[in-house]
Image (cartoon, coloured by chain):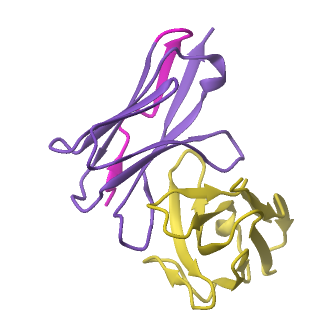
Amino acid sequence: GAVVSQHPSRVICKSGTSVKIECRSLDFQATTMFWYRQFPKQSLMLMATSNEGSKATYEQGVEKDKFLINHASLTLSTLTVTSAHPEDSSFYICSAALAGGPGEQFFGPGTRLTVL
Amino acid sequence: DQQVKQNSPSLSVQEGRISILNCDYTNSMFDYFLWYKKYPAEGPTFLISISSIKDKNEDGRFTVFLNKSAKHLSLHIVPSQPGDSAVYFCAATAWGGNEKLTFGTGTRLTIIP
């Protein structure tokens, strides 16, 4: 149990386009989902916390107008990178927390974004 | 401000021996700690966790030790196997908060056959 999927796994786009990444909890309801990004050989950096039905909470330094997060249901959260630029190229990972869990999160397989 | 630190970026261990990965934290509000294993281009996989009310938690070949006074935790893997080769991240959170995880920078473990 506790499987989280992400789609797409890999995307290459031109600079200026928008890219949407989906994160789904397949066999449980996630009241909270998290979005991370990871640069090569670096740690996972939390971008935002997404709660179903409410606005996402962004970490300091993360542009909320650039990284749009929608958490429409208890099993789906989406991250849209708007007007992507080469510096947005990264590995984006989502995770989902079980309700009442003390911090244990289940991670998706990640999405590799390359902006040309 | 790196609140969770893994000072060893890499570690090589002979197969069958013990692997010890270390992690230090600075935020005294953290009271729940987790270890994740990550392969390239994949999401992290949960390994083991420990609450601040304990100083040791064991699950099969994996044992996590917590020293609250030193703000230090370690993951022991014994015996080490080739499939253990991966990047290991420790993470910390403050239970009762918003469940945000703060990750360390990771340690790449290589098991030598």
Left or right of B111 on screen, residue B34: left
* Along the line of sight, the residue nearer the viewer: A54 or A44: A54
Left or right of B110 on screen, residue A103: left
* Quarter of the view holding residue B16: top right
Q: Please indicate, yes or no, whether residue A87 appears anywhere in the rendered image.
A: yes
State the quadrant of the C terminus of chain B: top right
* Residue at 82 percent of width and 58 percent of height: A9
* Along the line of sight, the residue nearer the viewer: B90 or B105: B90
Residue B77 lies in the magenta stretch: no
Query: Where is residue B70 shown, x and y percent of the image?
Result: 17, 41
* Quarter of the view holding residue B90: top left
Q: Colour of chain B?
A: purple
* Quarter of the view holding residue A63: bottom right
Residue B10 lies in the magenta stretch: yes
Left or right of A111 on screen, residue B39: left
Q: Which chain is yellow?
A: A
| Span of residues in magenta | B1-17
Query: Where is residue B89 shown, x and y percent of the image?
Result: 49, 43
Query: Where is residue B57 shown, x and y percent of the image?
Result: 38, 35
Query: Where is residue A31 shown, x and y percent of the image?
Result: 59, 76
Q: Please indicate, yes or no, whether residue B105 appears anywhere in the rendered image.
A: no
State the quadrant of the N terminus of chain B: bottom left
* Along the line of sight, the residue nearer the viewer: A48 or B81: B81
* Residue at 60 percent of width and 17 percent of height: B81
* Residue at 51 percent of width and 56 percent of height: A104
